[in-house]
Amino acid sequence: MKKILVGFMLLISIVLFSMSSSGLTYHFTDNNSLKTMGTFSPRLSGGISTVYYYINNYSTMSQYASDLISGIESWNSNSAINFTQTTVYWNSVCDVKVYDCDLLPAQIYNPDVNKIVNNPFKTCYAYAKLWYGGGPGASNNKGYEFVSELPATGDYWLGEIFINYKVLPSSNSSMKKQVAAHEAGHVLGLNHINLLSIMNDPLTTSSPATPTNTDKNNVYDLYYARW
Ligand SMILES: [Zn+2]
């Protein structure tokens, strides 16, 4: 998908009465499960058919990249969702940027309350951030995290996924995939739910390893039924 130039930020469904993809037809069966990242259900502005994601090349990423790719692209299986890796990180051709980082510092600025607060992500495996508005520093930019309902009033044009390599065990392949799929769900616009879903918070060993049909249907609801 294409987007125009600059602009950045923000942070992490039904019925289509039916929707065919890969030979499958999805019907929304559990619309009560849809929880979106904002009150107005903002979506990644380019849709879900071609979501280009870029994984950074920091040295620490070598321990994560293959599992992150597997986790993110697990959304593609038997669905209309298509995450495609790109080596281009320019905003005009990249929808999702994936970084490995430790979630320092201990305190961060929260634009919602205009205060410096303790960094709630310092001990998280990962988090997602959605961007909308005119770009970093623009007055209409806000950084959001996945745990809160967002007061966003529009769709967002970039998602970022931060992998906390100091906390997420590099030796746990299945967990890395699960976490990547979960954060990709936030980037698509989903919030946490407690059903059998990749959007469980926290993810546990009893959580699904990959997105479920509930998760995919929730995405369809978000992008098609309410488009
Ligand atoms: Zn989450």
Image (cartoon, grey):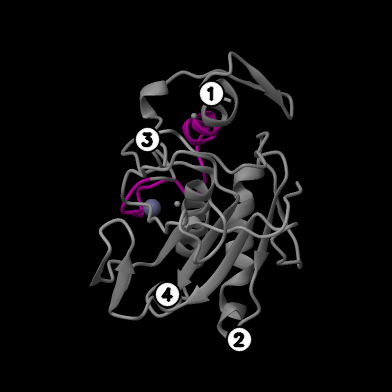
The quadrant of the rendering that contains the C terminus is top right
**Mark linked to residue 169:** 4
C-alpha distance separating marks 1 and 3 = 13 Å
The tag earlier along the polypeptide, 3 or 2, is 3
C-alpha distance separating marks 4 and 3 = 34 Å
The image shows residue 63 at horizontal and vertical percentages of: 57, 78
- The amino acid pointed to by label 4 is Pro
- The amino acid pointed to by label 3 is Thr
C-alpha distance separating marks 1 and 4 = 38 Å
Quick check: marks 1 and 3 in contact, CB under 8 Å?
no
Residue neighbourhood size for the residue with mark 2, other residues' Cα within 10 Å, grouped as few (<14), some (14–19), many (≥20): few
Task: Give the label, 3 or 2, closer to the camera.
Answer: 3
Residue at 49%, 31% (x, y): give it: 218
198 relative to 85, above or below: above
Task: Give the label, 4 or 3, closer to the camera.
Answer: 3
Residue sitting nearer the eye, 218 or 118: 118
Segment colored magenta: 200-219
**Mark linked to residue 20:** none
Image quadrant assignment for residue 110: bottom left
Residue sitting nearer the eye, 105 or 207: 105
Name the residue carrying label 1: 226
**Furthest residue in direction top, as rendered:** 17
Tell me the SS state at disc 4: loop
187 relative to 101, above or below: above
- The amino acid pointed to by label 1 is Arg
The image shows residue 52 at horizontal and vertical percentages of: 70, 54
The image shows residue 219 at horizontal and vertical percentages of: 54, 34
Q: Can residue 119 be seen by looking at this rendering? A: yes
The prevailing secondary structure element of the residues shown in magenta is loop
Image quadrant assignment for residue 108: bottom left
